[in-house]
Amino acid sequence: MSNDKMLTAERIARLREVMRRESLSAFIFTTSDPHQSEYTADHWKGREYISGFNGSAGTAVVTMKSAALWTDSRYFIAAAQQLEGTEFQLMKEKVEGTPTIAEWIGIACSDPQSPFEVGIDGMCSSVNEVKQMVSDLRHAGGFTLRTNFDPLRQIWINRPPLPDNPVEQFPVEWAGETCASKLSRIRQALHRQHADGMLMARLDDIAWTLNLRGADVHCNPVFVSYLLVTSTGATLYINKVKLPADIVVYLKAEGIKIDDYANVKEGLKRYFEQSILMDPDEVSYSLYNTLRQYNPGTRSAVQIIEAASPVPAMKAVKTPSEQAGFRQAMLADGLAMVELLRWLDEEADIEHETELSVSRKLEQLRAAQDGYRGPSFDTISAYAEHGAIVHYEPTAETDKPLQRRGLLLLDSGGHYTAGTTDITRTIALGPLTNEERRVYTLVLKGHLRLQNLCFPDGASGTQLDAVARSPLWAEGLNYLHGTGHGVGCRLCVHEGPHQIRMEWRPAPLHAGMTVTDEPGIYVEGRFGVRIENTLLVVNDDGKEGRFLRFEPLTLCPIDMRPVMPELLNDEERSWLSDYHERVFKELSPHLPLASRQWLRKVMN
Amino acid sequence: MSNDKMLTAERIARLREVMRRESLSAFIFTTSDPHQSEYTADHWKGREYISGFNGSAGTAVVTMKSAALWTDSRYFIAAAQQLEGTEFQLMKEKVEGTPTIAEWIGIACSDPQSPFEVGIDGMCSSVNEVKQMVSDLRHAGGFTLRTNFDPLRQIWINRPPLPDNPVEQFPVEWAGETCASKLSRIRQALHRQHADGMLMARLDDIAWTLNLRGADVHCNPVFVSYLLVTSTGATLYINKVKLPADIVVYLKAEGIKIDDYANVKEGLKRYFEQSILMDPDEVSYSLYNTLRQYNPGTRSAVQIIEAASPVPAMKAVKTPSEQAGFRQAMLADGLAMVELLRWLDEEADIEHETELSVSRKLEQLRAAQDGYRGPSFDTISAYAEHGAIVHYEPTAETDKPLQRRGLLLLDSGGHYTAGTTDITRTIALGPLTNEERRVYTLVLKGHLRLQNLCFPDGASGTQLDAVARSPLWAEGLNYLHGTGHGVGCRLCVHEGPHQIRMEWRPAPLHAGMTVTDEPGIYVEGRFGVRIENTLLVVNDDGKEGRFLRFEPLTLCPIDMRPVMPELLNDEERSWLSDYHERVFKELSPHLPLASRQWLRKVMN
């Protein structure tokens, strides 16, 4: 048994001791923090601590005699490797025959001697998650759910502390709207929902509202905090050491009170207005419960309005200043990408490079650009068959040397002063098979079909998703991930509320939103292709009624070498040629001569 | 004031007397029956009785001082006409600025003297409708909702009785599956949902399950009843006069008990098994409440499982026998349609015909076909600007004489022995404007884009909807109705659970389902175009993975005279030519010589 596996076994043993003492049949570890973040600070990586699995999505469950981990198709291969030799059984989500968490607990704990209580940390689970789990566990065998107990406090030795990195300004010149104006719009929206306040827990919503940025989560410029908005004021609950003097002055000037992060529960109880909005997908069950238990539901006390927060939809529509920030970021990012592509094509000794070395090279080239602030997510650099592992990230153990053939899938992005990028290019390193060329061309057709769609104002991403897939479906191909997501403005690279995907996402698309267009095809054991630009939703003028279209923000050539030209139609060819013309026009004044010449060469 | 308007005024006055006595601020009249039917027997047309508006969708609300009626865009014009001169104010659903019902009540009843109770008939509203209304009314001003009082019992003079038309067999040779087999599959599905029984209220689900048909609702071959399914038996609650002797024998042989329609509440209370499934979109609030109040929620009593009924998804997949019945119906229907189209083209004295006379002619031609059982819905025969009124049905007052120019939109369908049809053709009666031709061709392109889509097994209609719209969106055009719906097998012409529409309908598409493909464009004041075939979902063989495609069931030429050929691509032209070849091959052996020659002529 390796050290890692021994560690996992010891941790499970310590957990079971605590579970026995507390009469719990099972404990559920989710992948979140009290802010429902997609990526969390290390302090909250409890699921990774107990299971050893470090993917960005998954749920671990431990009973007295067994353990299992649920994750999605992106991580089936990585999770199988990481869980090997531990007690944890891998549960593949959305695969036929995989039990739900509650079903599995119902079977694993069916011994009539075992207690009827299951645990979950109510601080790290949303209201809706807990409500659903309560109902599922009841059906699965009459279990009840305890939410007020976190065993990690007792068993996690050397648990990383709460992050305390400094907060910085995101000036109004870049944001395009003052904090006061945003708060006023939020209060208007709350008023329309008959609420006179709300608890904001999502970290990027708080950063956006206050025109501040942080550094508490890897790749996510947010700061751990809560913001309680009332009809007349607002209180920021935050570890005060994170606030430099200028920020304290700024917050005071904006009328924002400051209180300790740990005092948010007290703050909620002190909240004596009529009704407070809590988004049940945003607020943790424990905080919701604090107010609910405090307020026994009599007409005179505070009423909790469970409804979607109005903030994500506001944040999603970028101001003209934010759009300018994006364009600046895309210019810098395009320059770095072109340098990388030229280097790969003309200069690199490919056989001495690896997935990781290319990833590092790209990071160096980005770092040399004006305003670069760091990666917006961990680069996916996946050569040949690694390209078929959708969320592959090379590590020292898996790193693969490149060859002068096949496809390198490179999905990366950066934060810049006032904008964020997300781009995928799939690059021919040399000769390709006909299958690689055909799949590449079909993915490109899917990308262009969505890129060139005109659609009514207010359409949802779910409605548009099939457009990118239809050229692939026609050939019997499909991909199981989403087609696109919003991109934050020097905020999280995955941003809601809109998404372009098969599942229902009702959030309407409006002019000013950013969204990615990233269809892909993954041929297991051989290669993967994904082509992604970040797009801006713009008005399609000159039509009766209100119609929208997409303008590409990303400025980087699409590799034309793998394309089978006979599969493209005139419209597609002419769009590609116009796009490359525009890329050349915008990037070339800033490129060194060699790169300018290279860009001119590959455009055609 | 006309007699109609006086009647409405008198009825409102009588209602208000009752409301005053019962201390109700407002009463809400929905358009449904205790079975959540789209079309109801006359007995339940209370909303029409009180408001005078006879559309198939709408909600009337009466307060002590005001009255309003909500309906959707299909009925804006008709409702405005029918409500004119009454107290009812028209509320246009989904139009910006239109208040919700609860918001309107909140304002209309804001007088602090007025009582805090609003009424609705809980027997004619589903569980989910009532729960939503309770929540909306609470937010709108703290109103409570009374559900156990139906004022129509006191004020409706000469209310039509419950229908008592005879029930007939739908033989297993046509159904392709015995009642016993269906009940066994339903019980398996219930078992998977941890329910050991269910209350079925939807009339077409009951007809399908029992392999019976009725005649209680205009155009809908259903019979008013409930079916209570337990783990070992089933009871049909029905007015026994409707059951001929052979049906009584048949039901007995199938082990189905028979009880009076009015006894369903008693039956629910006698239901002493562990858990019963009630679909909150199917079961009326009053019946749900009967069981809930009877069962105070202790662990030992019956548990209500609120979940979607498994029956619609089973009914939607047609057996090979049902598919054969559809094909037979489509053949007969195609013969009638070809006769009509030839008559319009070659024989009719168009200037002496009207919308209604064409509708009657079509009904005669259908009646002459083998196995015809009557219309599956009221024919929409809409000439010129009437075509722009989406749910226009000609009446003696509105009937429009035809001319040898412009477009006639004809949307109709029939029930035949073992299948049902739904078809729309838009027919050029003579010269057309360029706008008419362009819109016609774009609608045809939308129809074909969906018709020729290949998609993965299990995709939802919401995912596919945009495919039919994209050629229209590209030209700044759109339509606000759905693109397609399931068609019952000699059952309701609108059948779920799948639908192809903008709104979220998660029901997955599978091989064996029927669905219509009916995009349209409506140019107000000028003309409307809709082109509709009924399609069968079939496996798309020869692809890796499981993919589906659509096969047209409808056999009737599409008018090629309005087409602008330069707007069609090769694939579209070749599909049309193949389709017309197939229509000719299947219909011509059964057509008289003149019609055969006409069909050969218009095919090209």
Image (cartoon, coloured by chain):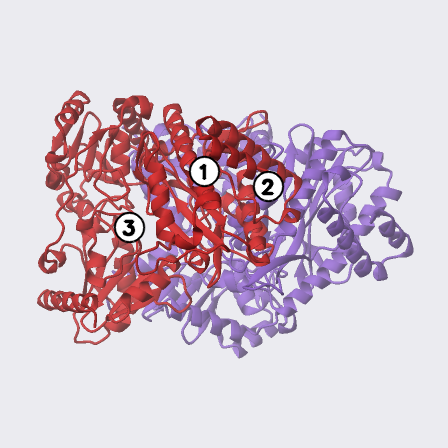
Chain colours: A purple, B red
- Report the Cα–Cα distance between label 2 and label 1: 38 Å
In the foreground, B548 or A7: B548
- Percent position of residue B519, x then y: 49, 48
Task: Decide if residue B267 is on the left or right side of residue A600.
Answer: left
Residue placed under numbered mark 1 in the picture = B338
**SS at mark 1?**
helix
User: Which marked residue is nearer to the observer: mark 2 or mark 1?
Assistant: 1
**Helix, strand or loop at mark 2:** helix
The nearer-to-camera label among 2 and 3 is 2
Q: Chain of mark 1?
A: B
**Residues at marks 1 and 3 on the same chain:** yes
Which residue corresponds to the image point at 75% horizontal and 37% vertical from the top-left? Answer: A566
For mark 2, what is the residue? A469
Please report contact status of discs 2 and 3: CB closer than 8 Å, yes or no.
Answer: no
Which residue appears at 86% of the width and 41% of the height? A348
Q: Is residue B233 above or below residue A461?
A: above
Element at label 3:
helix
In percent of width and height, residue A319 lies at: 60, 68
